[in-house]
Amino acid sequence: MAVFVYAENINGVYKKAAFEAVSYAKAIATKTGDSVTAISINPTDSSDLLYKYGADKVVNVKDAGLKNFSAKAYAEAINQIADGNIIVFPHTTDASSIAPMLAIQKNYSLITNVIDVPESISPFQVKRRAFSGKGFMHAKADAAGVIVTVSQNAFGVKENPVQGSEEVKELSITNEDTKVINHEQSSGKLDLKEAEIVVSAGRGLKGPENWGMIEDLANVLGAATACSKPVSDIGWRGHNEHVGQTGKAISPNLYIAVGISGAIQHLAGVNSSKTIVVINNDPEAPFFKSADYGVVGDAFQIIPALTEKIKALKA
Ligand SMILES: Cc1cc2nc3c(=O)[nH]c(=O)nc-3n(C[C@H](O)[C@H](O)[C@H](O)COP(=O)(O)OP(=O)(O)OC[C@H]3O[C@@H](n4cnc5c(N)ncnc54)[C@H](O)[C@@H]3O)c2cc1C
């Protein structure tokens, strides 16, 4: 029996989340004594990239009808291939919409946002994030099969090279329900949900003209940029950068929050970050309660100085 894993790609290029999901599937397979089969839809990247993290077999689905993403059509394609009783997905936006559809098609349990290898396989029990990242729970699957989505940056990308094999599968799924009206391109250079470091700013920055210093800091750190909800609501930044309860939920290794008060709805999307640094000129700002490191001061002085210091250190 194989542990199946969905290896997500964007325009054919594997995401970091795909490598993390394969690493996670390998950890389960090691526990169960099974192999790992990765499924990817229309990839252009080499399967070698997935063998590196432990995929014993890679099934590359070729289907022109799946050129545009559709959760229903992708679930149908994966359903035709994944005949094991453990299926792993990354907890990305796309995969999080495929996984529930597949769970219904297969009548499997669905456990989202898992953060560790299962405590037991039969019954399948695993630790997951709950309540917008404010708590944890140990979820138990009660169906014959289980689908899990792995919280990004929680398990990590772990090399486990194997001699893998590849199979190309030609499918022809009908994808008539989906019509692409527009593609929104992320303004940042890095995918916010994949980024290890995120520099985020709020209304404390006073206006969009001041975002240059945030981008400069992000550039020297190799970070993605994010913002609070009001900032994207006013139109200072695009909605693709909005993090929080109603925006993207992220869990980078380092989250730097500049001029953000730390409202509960903002924290809901960022409190799974491994280290949080808060820069705010109000010592009473609620965000300091959730911070690992806090700097009380004016962002307009601190950010350029910090950027220069990091540049000097790197030089
Ligand atoms: C249903 C619902 C859902 C929501 N979802 C989200 C969500 O997903 N994400 C989200 O972010 N919000 C969300 N909100 C809004 C949230 O409640 C807050 O209003 C919002 O997060 C505040 O944004 P802010 O911190 O940028 O602005 P503010 O609350 O105005 O805070 C600005 C901060 O900047 C500091 N500051 C000012 N000048 C400087 C300076 N020169 N240097 C340093 N610091 C300075 C201030 O001290 C202050 O702490 C939601 C609200 C509701 C009701």
Image (tube, helix red, strand yellow):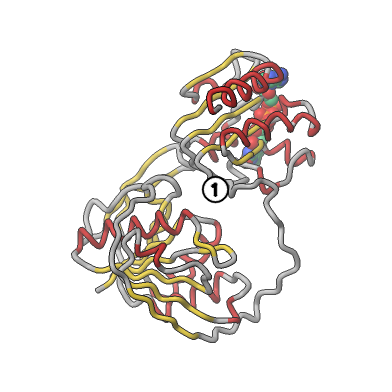
Residue at the location (33% across, 66% down)? 55
Residue at the location (30% across, 67% down)? 36
Give residue 73's quadrant in the image: bottom right
- The quadrant of the picture showing ligand 1 is top right
Residue at the location (25% across, 62% down)? 29
- Front-most of residues 104 and 186: 186
- Front-most of residues 36 and 266: 36
Q: Secondary structure at mark 1?
A: loop
Q: Quadrant of the C terminus?
A: top right
Q: Residues within 10 Å of mark 1 (few under 14, many from 20)?
A: many
Give residue 210's quadrant in the image: top right
Which residue appears farthest toward the front when viewing the image?
315
Q: Height in image: 86 above or below 212?
A: below
What residue is pinned by disc 1? 193
Total number of numbered discs in the rendering: 1
Q: Position of residue 46 (x, y in %)?
A: 45, 68
Q: Position of residue 148 (x, y in %)?
A: 38, 59
Q: Position of residue 190 (x, y in %)?
A: 60, 47
Q: Is residue 142 left or right of residue 43?
A: left
Which amino acid, mark 1? Lys
Q: Height in image: 93 above or below 11?
A: above
